[in-house]
Amino acid sequence: MSGSQVVGRCRAGHAWQPNGWQADTSLAIDARGQLLEVASDVPATGSLGDWVLPGMPNLHSHAFQRAMAGLAERRGGVEDSFWSWRETMYGFAATIGPEELQAIAAQLYVEMLKAGYTHVCEFHYLHHQPDARPYAPAEAMSLALIEAAREAGIGLTLLPVLYMTGGFDGRALGERQRRFGHAVEDYLRLLEALHTHTADDLRVGIALHSLRAVPEVALREVLGSAVAQTGPIHIHIAEQLGEVQDCLAVRGARPVEWLFDHAGVDARWCLVHATHLTADEMQQIARSGAVAGLCPTTEGNLGDGLFPLPAYLDAGGVLGIGSDSHISISPVEELRWLEYGQRLHTHHRNVAARRPGDSVGETLWREALRGGAQACGAPVGSLRAGARADLIVLDENSPLLAARDARSMLDSFLFAGNTPLVRNVMVGGYWQVRDFHHHDEERIGARYRAVVERLASGRTTA
Ligand code: NGQ
Ligand code: ZN
């Protein structure tokens, strides 16, 4: 990881803790990039800034989709839907090989860092060549993502995806889905190969694409395997009504209901989207301690529906945020849409704040840190001893933050305006962004531009 390293004791004017801002805090960072001690009123040598927050984990990303953002917003001949968007996405995916993936992902990760995300869960299913033959090595596409994360300096939880069937009825993968597919045995081999790369800034977990894509026997085999006994487990679930109906028709239960009946869903799980829930399913998720992986800008873009946020918060449910298809790369925008969707729906204000006096911004940032960290399976998302030193420093000079104090800072960060307020970003003790600038953004940006221009002209190396 490059960027400039900080080791020693640094002062934060205010550091964000789960119970609120803590004034005059000193953070001791060791040579491994971990927080050794976080204490009040201890003399420090360096200064981090006035308003220091833990970096936000991004719990759901399909990196390649970044380069098609904006290319699916023109109406087709039919009534456009999630499913017609998916056809466009499949066409685009077919042009992406390791070189394209690395260039796109590195650019994406630089943008994530600049927006305040310091760790990303990559839900990765572009495994093979477009004609479904394996790359050499077979994990080439995964390695491209690992390399991209290293170049940008963002923490990564790589979630290789198991994708076996084209629907609940067990039908074979379609022509353009074949490169996503694995036999269980090959999938477990991929996981094992990737586990050898595990490091402080790199975790490996498991992803099941969806119940549509994973037959019951395969689900059992994978969950019973040795590599599946630790680390996070992610799955797309109940995002679209069509999926709920198909699941009911073929498996006789709704997707979340079926999953709880067939897998021991617990705090290791992240249920991505979980949009269409009965009250019982919502309670079940909350009780399990699993993370609801919410991606409000993508869910809005794809016309998915609204997550039952207030009831879920009241039930003590865990949630985190992801930028998913990357039509937006900003924790501010994800959290804003999460709240605004509810306001538009309920005709009320301050929906995420469940008790009088609570702040919406504080509630959402706190919850997304907690659930995001859980979904990453890494010691991130908090400024406490033992955590990785991942933090963001707000731009105290911005007019948007003038005359703001501890009571109003997070609400102003999340709800006031459109200019970037994340000034400096540290991951694992290294400054990756200083004064809004990523240390390698020119090179990574130029390479990205060359790759998308090549893709636009129809030339690809995939
Ligand atoms: C994906 N994305 O895997 O990229 C999916 C679409 C599908 C989102 N659901 C494809 N947002 O679900 O089959
Ligand atoms: Zn997804």
Image (tube, helix red, strand yellow):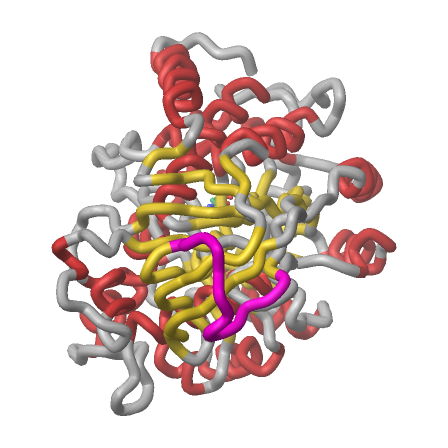
Near-viewer residue (160 or 11): 11
Residue 423 spot, x, y in % from top left: 31, 47
Residue 425 spot, x, y in % from top left: 42, 47
Near-viewer residue (148 or 161): 148
Q: Quadrant of residue 226?
A: bottom right
Q: Quadrant of residue 388?
A: bottom right
Left or right position of 319 against 375: left
Residue at 67%, 58% (x, y): give it. Answer: 232
Q: Is residue 273 visible?
A: no
Residue 437 spot, x, y in % from top left: 34, 34
- Residue 171 in magenta stretch: no
Residue at 59%, 40% (x, y): give it. Answer: 124
Q: In which quarter of the image is residue 219?
A: bottom right
Question: Which quarter shows the N terminus?
Answer: top right
Q: Is residue 313 above or below residue 447?
A: below
Question: Which quarter shows the C terminus?
Answer: top right
Chief secondary structure of the magenta portion: strand
Q: Give the range drawn in magenta.
A: 36-48
Residue at 39%, 33% (x, y): give it. Answer: 438
Toward the bottom, the furthest residue is 356
Q: In this view, does 241 lie above or below 100?
A: below
Residue at 47%, 86% (x, y): give it. Answer: 315
- Residue 47 in magenta stretch: yes
Q: Can residue 424 be seen in this view?
A: yes
Near-viewer residue (5 or 170): 5
Q: In this view, does 367 lie above or below 208?
A: below
Residue 164 spot, x, y in % from top left: 68, 42
Left or right position of 383 against 224: left
Toward the right, the furthest residue is 226
